[in-house]
Image (cartoon, helix red, strand yellow):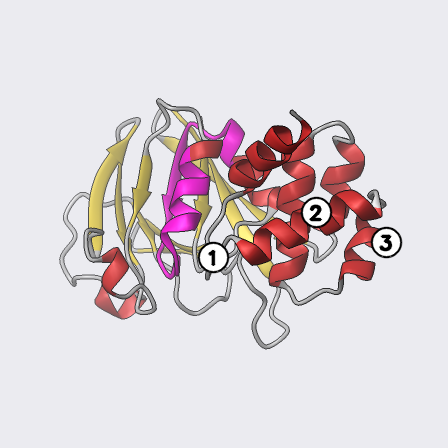
């Protein structure tokens, strides 16, 4: 069983993260999502039957009021506790085997008192030149191992070269570049994409605040008609 563990996306869902979401059997998000759009994009990318466990972080304001501050759940017989900030983990967590948290943007996995304490780091916008990371938990018959996933700034370029015919991935890569503050010229060069197509994506993204990659794709297809 594959569990995608992410946190601190801060309004940016990177294409490489989307690839893991698509093949995950469960998804865990440790908060600081920053927009409903990210949740919608996760929901659109994942299998409809794949459970999503998510809590709100300190930067998730009024819009995220429906999300819990902490969450306890069980996957394949393994008991989890999820919270954004490690300092908010209760002293007594009887039966909990894996604690997932975020907030610091720093990847960490430690065994303490027989429990795994896992911070997947931040896979959203880079801060203070810290690495961009998430984690993947491989779970089988009550046992697990953790895989640290390091995401390059050029992840979008790799995805596009791997999937040259996938327009949705290309759109997601262009959006990721815009979120990083890249110029249109840099996006075109790094993705090796058609300038007119990139310009069209950028124009729709700017003129339709909150639009998703799927929404942009639908508008492009409609314009073709």
Count neighbours of disc 2 (C-alpha within 10 A) and say few if under 14, some if 14 to 19, many if 20 or more: few
Quarter occupied by the N terminus = top left
Distance between the alpha carbons at the discs numbered 2 and 3: 16 Å
Picture layout, residue 99 above or below residue 128: above
Indicate yes or no whether the magenta region holds residue 47.
no
- Residue at 70 percent of width and 47 percent of height: 200
Q: Which mark is residue 200?
A: 2
Would you place residue 149 above or below residue 144 in this image? below
Give the residue number, with chain letter if any, for mark 1. Answer: 9
Q: Position of residue 21 (x, y in %)?
A: 50, 35
> Which quadrant of the view contains residue 31?
bottom left
- Near mark 1 (Cα within 10 A), the count class, few <14, some 14-19 or many ≥20, is many
**Which circle's residue, 2 or 3, is located before the other in the chain?**
3
Between 121 and 110, the one nearer to me in the picture: 121
In the image, residue 181 lies at what x, y percent?
A: 66, 67
Looking at the rendering, the stretch of residues picked out in magenta corresponds to 21-43
- Give the number of marks: 3
- Residue 55 image position (x, y, % from top left): 28, 53
The residue under label 3 is 189
2 and 1 marks in contact (CB < 8 Å)? no
Check if residue 41 falls in the magenta segment: yes
Name the secondary structure under disc 2.
helix
């Amino acid at each position: 069983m594959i569990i995608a563990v992410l946190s601190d996306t801060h309004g940016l869902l990177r294409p490489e993260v989307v690839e893991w979401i698509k093949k995950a059997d469960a998804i865990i998000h440790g908060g600081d999502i920053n927009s409903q759009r990210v949740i919608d994009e996760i929901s659109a990318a994942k299998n409809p039957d794949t459970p999503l466990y998510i809590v709100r972080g300190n930067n998730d304001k009024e819009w995220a009021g429906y999300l819990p501050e902490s969450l306890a759940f069980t996957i394949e017989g393994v008991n989890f506790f999820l919270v954004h900030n490690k300092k908010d983990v209760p002293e007594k967590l009887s039966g909990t085997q894996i604690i997932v948290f975020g907030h610091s943007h720093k990847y960490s996995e430690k065994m303490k008192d027989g429990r795994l304490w896992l911070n997947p780091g931040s896979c959203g916008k880079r801060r203070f030149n810290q690495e961009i990371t998430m984690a993947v938990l491989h779970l089988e018959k009550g046992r697990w191992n953790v895989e640290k996933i390091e995401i390059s700034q050029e992840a979008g370029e790799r995805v596009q070269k791997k999937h040259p015919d996938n327009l949705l991935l290309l759109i997601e890569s262009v959006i990721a570049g815009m979120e990083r503050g890249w110029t249109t010229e840099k996006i075109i060069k790094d993705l090796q994409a058609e300038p007119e197509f990139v310009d069209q994506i950028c124009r729709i993204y700017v003129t339709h605040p909150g639009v998703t990659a799927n929404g942009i794709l639908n508008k492009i297809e409609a314009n073709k008609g």
